[in-house]
Amino acid sequence: MCAIIDACVATRIFVDKDDPDLGLIRQYLFARKLQVVYGGELAREYLKLTTVSRIVRKLDQVGIARKIPDKAVDEKDKEVQTAGNCTSNDTHLIALALVSRARLLCSADHALHADFKNRNIIAKPRGRIYQNTTHNHLLMRKCKVCELIG
């Protein structure tokens, strides 16, 4: 499964070892059962979080994280903004999902949740949101993108 980890929860996943709601995401990442994708504005947001940036860079080196080219994400972000379908201010995460085809989002931003689940914005397959342990079933899904990249 490929996931996008919003900067608002990145520290809880990458740094906090015992977070009760997001700990399973961390376990899946380090067990190589989950891959995180990042790029564009999200990559720049991670850089502002020094510890997160260092951990993501190491995960990238071992193949647990995958950087999507900034240019591709930024160009798609402009398209998403121009379309005007988003209610949140996180069009860069929608763009990342569209470019990477990742359909699992870890975020605490409810406006972004609405956009990510909006079938007029993200479809085939639709976006899914992971917020806490009641969403553990989402981690059992397989995605064709992860199967293609190994």
Image (cartoon, rainbow, N blue to C red):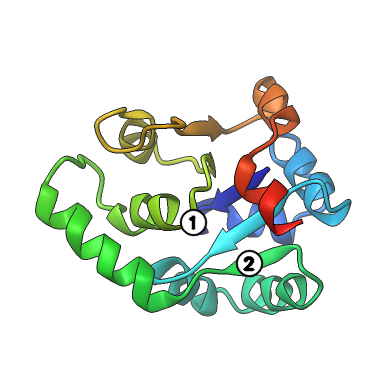
Can you say whether 120 is above or below 92 in the image?
above
Q: Position of residue 124 (x, y in %)?
A: 42, 32
Task: Find the distance from the CA under tag 2 to the CA under tag 1.
Answer: 9 Å
The N terminus - image quarter: top right
Q: Position of residue 53 (x, y in %)?
A: 62, 76
Circle 1: element type = helix
Give the labeled residue for mark 2. Answer: 66
**Foreground residue, 141 or 88?**
141
Is disc 1 surrounded by few (<14), some (14 to 19) or many (20+) residues within 10 Å?
many
Q: Which mark is residue 128?
A: none
**Residue drawn 61% across the image and 79% down it:** 50
The C terminus - image quarter: bottom right
Is disc 2 surrounded by few (<14), some (14 to 19) or many (20+) residues within 10 Å?
some
The image quadrant of residue 54 is: bottom right
**Foreground residue, 43 or 95?**
95
- Marks 2,1: beta carbons within 8 A: yes
**Residue drawn 31% across the image and 29% down it:** 118
Amino acid carrying label 2: it is Arg
Q: Position of residue 91 (x, y in %)?
A: 28, 54
**Residue drawn 54% across the image and 51% down it:** 4
Q: Which mark is residue 100?
A: 1
Amino acid carrying label 1: it is Ser
Can you say whether 90 is above or below 105 in the image?
below
The image quadrant of residue 66 is: bottom right
Earlier in the chain: of badge 2 and badge 1, it is 2
Task: In the displayed orientation, state which residue is furthest to the front.
Answer: 148
**Residue drawn 40% across the image and 71% down it:** 40
